[in-house]
Amino acid sequence: MAGPVGIREVAARAMVSVGTVSHVLNRPELVSTATLKRVLATMDELGFVRNDLARQLKMGGGTTLGMIVLNVANPFFGGLAHACETAAEALGHTVIFGSSDQLDGREDRYIDLFEEQRVRGMIIAPLGGQTARIERVIRRGMPVVLFDIHANEGDFCSVALDGNAGGYLAVRHLLDAGRRRIAFLGGPLHQVDDRWKGALRAVAEIDGASLTHFDTLDQTIADGRTIGNQLAALPAASRPDGVFAANDLLALGLMQSLVIADDIDVPRDISIVGYDDIDYAASAIVPLTTIRQPKEALAEEAVRLVLDHAANAEAHVHEHLLLPPELIVRASTTAA
């Protein structure tokens, strides 16, 4: 099988110099109209594809960003990736994506791949904060923005929703509605620690209120259904009367299990608050009260920071942004 067509083959077929083909690719204003048309037609005829990676290395920078999310199957991360793509495109850049699926090895492989491809910068939702692999690419000069990590120092930028404030807002809403036996649903806990601490802070303000943690291996609808089945099997007096789920998928799975139980009414018996405000939240069988993450604002800030670092490596000042949460009240919560 023949290899890829290069500029020498194009030059020979179009009967021009290699330098002329290079001008057509990089400085077409220096080439006559007739020659430009002839060279472009030859490229089409031969199936020539320009090597943008080589061009980027020669020019000292590319127009591609790498992005790693925890799980692209989660509608929130899918929406965030789309928002980053839109924000980058508005600034003349493209984004290539990888999903770690919460596997350390896969996250590391994507980081290595993006570095090999000489991306202009990376936006990473990391599994374990600033890992050794991330530190290594930062030391080698790669601009990195960490998403959904709450940092205040380091050789990187970070962008996140204020999860502590979000957890507080969610549980305070349940408490203000008269709920006192609050359950926090979500894990692994280190990934949602800020939301848990916010929930603890809210419960500490109300005498007689309690907070129980139901751990999950992941944050999927199936995990939510599993906990829902456990709660439905409890005596009514032992069940929580308010649940804060660490994301909307958990909340929706929980709700699915509870609404099919004969003796449990959502929200009268158990009120539920989610987190993220994915598109499905508003159209659930009981529309879900949730904490909204502003995907577009998060994406715009992440893209801005990584491109600013890439363009101003020496003068760049690392920023650590915490955006404020917003409570969206729907039918899954009501007064006790």
Image (cartoon, helix red, strand yellow):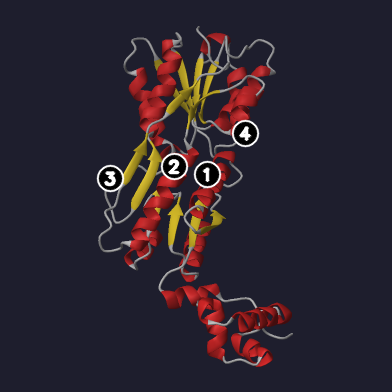
Q: Cβ–Cβ below 8 Å for labels 1 and 2? A: yes
Q: Could you give the CA–CA distance between mark 2 and mark 3, rounded to whole angstroms? A: 17 Å
Q: Earlier in the sequence, mark 1 or mark 2?
A: 1
Q: Which mark is residue 152?
A: 3
Numbered-mark total:
4
At 44% across and 53% down in the image, what residue appears? Answer: 123
SS under mark 3: loop
Q: Which residue is mark 2?
A: 298
Percent x, y of residue 225: 63, 28
Q: Could you give the CA–CA distance between mark 1 and mark 2, rounded to whole angstroms? A: 8 Å
Q: Amino acid at mark 3?
A: Asn
At 48% across and 64% down in the image, what residue appears? Answer: 63
Q: Amino acid at mark 2?
A: Leu
Q: Amino acid at mark 1?
A: Leu
Q: Nearer the viewer, residue 43 or 54?
A: 43
Q: Which residue is mark 4?
A: 221
Q: Could you give the CA–CA distance between mark 4 and mark 3, rounded to whole angstroms? A: 33 Å
SS under mark 4: helix
Disc 1 versus disc 4: nearer the observer: 1
Categorize mark 1 by other alpha carbons within 10 Å: few (<14), some (14-19), many (20+). Answer: many
Percent x, y of residue 86: 53, 49
Q: Could you give the CA–CA distance between mark 1 and mark 4, rounded to whole angstroms? A: 19 Å
Q: Which residue is mark 1?
A: 80
* The residue positioned farthest toward the front in the image shown: 33
Q: Earlier in the sequence, mark 2 or mark 3?
A: 3
Categorize mark 2 by other alpha carbons within 10 Å: few (<14), some (14-19), many (20+). Answer: many
Q: Amino acid at mark 4?
A: Ile
Q: Is residue 263 above or below residue 137?
A: above
Percent x, y of residue 49: 63, 76
Q: Quadrant of residue 58?
A: bottom left
Residue 229 visible, this angle: no
